[in-house]
């Protein structure tokens, strides 16, 4: 089976940098994805790491260490609109494209 | 492209009633899935399909049925609604698995 752990809440100041961590346990690892979800909205894809290292997409970066079963999402130059829930997810081991999601980290950006 | 569409947006059912949540995508994705999201929790996979005519159970399939007669459509049927099925339901489609496109969701209340 799979399990993912991430902090339930994080608060950060506008303009600052915040890191959201995710540790996972899974049989058969195919990669770690990150999704953003605003209140009342649908999850939207942010990034994906299949290999160790850092992937950068604008203000967002995602890091993976497969040996540590650990990844993080880094948000730079925080804006008020970044207040949302962030989910890490792993592909499951069935061979289908199923994602198994963590319970999410609610990020609150304060002025 | 409309992406992934879901209907209805909101629904109230009485215990024991049945209904079908509709989902359609216009991206020609073979993989489609249904998730439910409960307050403070991540998304849990109900059923998925890897192509027309092929469906399988996810993490929480009890009380739900699916079928996939075309690539575009993937309806979810609640057989006999129960209060425990009060949730937000998201349909998703994907080409690669790690990047999934979600519909806007259906907010279902069972009284």
Image (spheres, coloured by chain):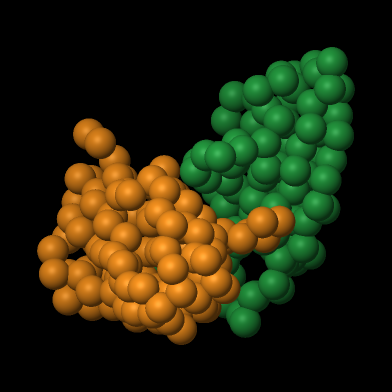
> In this image, A25 relative to A28: left or right?
right
Q: Nearer the viewer, residue A26 or B72?
A: B72
Q: In the figure, the orange chain has which letter? A: B
Q: Residue at x 68, y 28 (%)?
A: A82
* In the image, residue A32 above or below residue B69: above
User: Can see residue B45?
Assistant: no
Q: Is residue B89 left or right of residue A58?
A: left
Display colour for chain A? green
Please name whichever residue, A81 or B31, is drawn nearer the observer in this view of the structure: A81
Q: Position of residue B59 (x, y in %)?
A: 52, 78
The residue nearer to you, when weighing B108 against A40, is B108
Q: Position of residue A51 (x, y in %)?
A: 60, 55
Seen at 24% across and 52% down, the residue is B24
Q: Residue at x 34, y 79 (%)?
A: B79
The spot of residue B48 in percent (x, y) is: 36, 71
Q: Quadrant of the N terminus of chain B?
A: top left
Residue B89 pos. (x, y %):
46, 58
**Residue at horizontal 25 percent and vertical 36 percent from the top:** B2
Q: Is residue B74 visible to the viewer in this orientation of the structure?
A: yes
The image shows residue B108, relative to residue B64, as above or below, that is: above
């Amino acid at each position: 089976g799979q399990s993912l752990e991430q902090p339930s809440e994080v608060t950060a100041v506008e303009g600052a940098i915040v890191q959201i961590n995710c540790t996972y346990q899974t049989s058969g690892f195919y990669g770690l994805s990150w999704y953003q979800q605003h209140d009342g909205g649908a999850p939207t894809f942010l990034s994906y790491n299949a290999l160790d290292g850092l992937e950068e997409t604008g203000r967002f970066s995602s890091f993976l260490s497969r040996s540590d079963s650990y990844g993080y999402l880094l948000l730079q130059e925080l804006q008020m609109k970044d207040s949302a829930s962030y989910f890490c997810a792993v592909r499951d081991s069935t061979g289908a494209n199923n994602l198994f999601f963590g319970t999410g980290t609610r990020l609150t950006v304060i002025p | 492209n409309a992406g992934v569409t879901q209907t209805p947006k909101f629904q109230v059912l009485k215990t024991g009633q049945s209904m079908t949540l509709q989902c359609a995508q216009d991206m020609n994705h073979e993989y489609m899935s249904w998730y439910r999201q409960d307050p403070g929790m991540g998304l849990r996979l109900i059923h998925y399909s890897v192509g027309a005519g092929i469906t399988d159970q996810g993490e929480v399939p009890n009380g739900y049925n699916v079928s996939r007669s075309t690539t575009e459509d993937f309806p979810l049927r609640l057989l006999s609604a129960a209060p425990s099925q009060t949730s937000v339901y998201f349909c998703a489609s994907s080409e690669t698995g790690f990047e999934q496109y979600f519909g806007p969701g259906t907010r279902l209340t069972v009284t």
